[in-house]
Amino acid sequence: MGKRDVPKPWGARILHPFLAGWIARATGISLESAFFFLALVATFVVGLLLAQFAYKATGNPWWSLLAVHPGLLQAIGSIYLNDLFLLAVVLIFLSTLSIPPLALLFAVLAVLTREVGLIAVVIAGAILLAQGKRLYGAGLILSGLLAWFVIIPRIASIETNLHGAPEIVYMVARSFAAFVKNFFGFQIWTDSLAQLWAKWEMGDCKTPLFSLTLPVPIGNVYKVGICPWQLRHILVFATVYLTGWGVFPGLI
């Protein structure tokens, strides 16, 4: 596997393809078989830990079947995507919170898998801080930030993010845009994103409801706007992500 510059966010999602490549080289199996093996392991881990969370929450592990949703089944079938693998890593991270050294390790691994792993780590750290476990909570948050801002840039070959924006601005804006889309049904529009949609023939927001020109450009972003409201954004988040990514960890 050659090392290529890949734009964020994809270039920062390094753990899953790294493990697949390592398994393929170490065992001599094909890369496809290595990804399939990781998918099998992740499926087993997700099933086991969801059943454990369900048992702790309700006393009946069979309630974990509520998490069997087309979104989860699609993730299982897409062996090259890291959705299922990330879910497995995050569930392990949540299940090891009572063992700080392991939790710190899997906090880093979650961030190395996908950028949203940092959100899970920060939320867990914030809860620990609220519980008075200040050193532990701060350690979790710092470990996640260290993985994102120090480890990944040093070991991954990554181009700048698709908008050419400063990293901290990109992360904050991306999280805010995801929140507005998933909970309120409005997708944030930028002229840089519109150019990518046109190039890749994707996206369903060619004309925003309104837009404004930034007084100072942020990277490649000169205009920002709001796309028309769509209920499906909320429904997709509520049905696919809350179930496909595990109902019970969120409830607990």
Image (cartoon, rainbow, N blue to C red):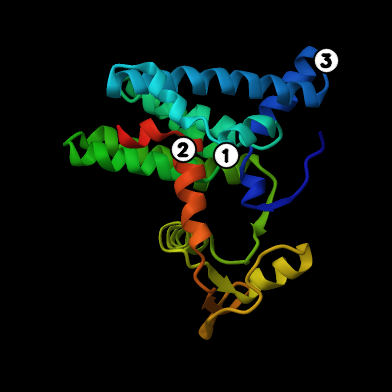
Q: Nearer the viewer, mark 3 or mark 1?
A: 1
Q: Position of residue 227 (x, y in %)?
A: 54, 73
Decide: is 210 above or below 148.
below
How far across and how far down the image is residue 88, in percent?
51, 27
Q: Name the amino acid, label 1.
A: Gly
Sequence-earlier tag: 2 or 1 = 1
Provide the residue designation for mark 1.
Answer: 71
Q: Mark 2 and 1 residues: CB-CB less than 8 Å, in contact?
A: yes
Label 3, label 2: how far apart the Cα atoms are: 36 Å
Give the answer, above or below, for where 227 lies relative to 133.
below
What residue did someone put label 3 on? 28
Q: Position of residue 243 (x, y in %)?
A: 46, 37
Q: Which picture quadrant has residue 201? A: bottom right
Disc 3, SS? loop
Q: Is residue 155 above or below residue 20?
A: below
Q: Which mark is residue 139?
A: none
Where disc 2 sits, the SS reads helix
Report the amino acid beneath label 2: Thr
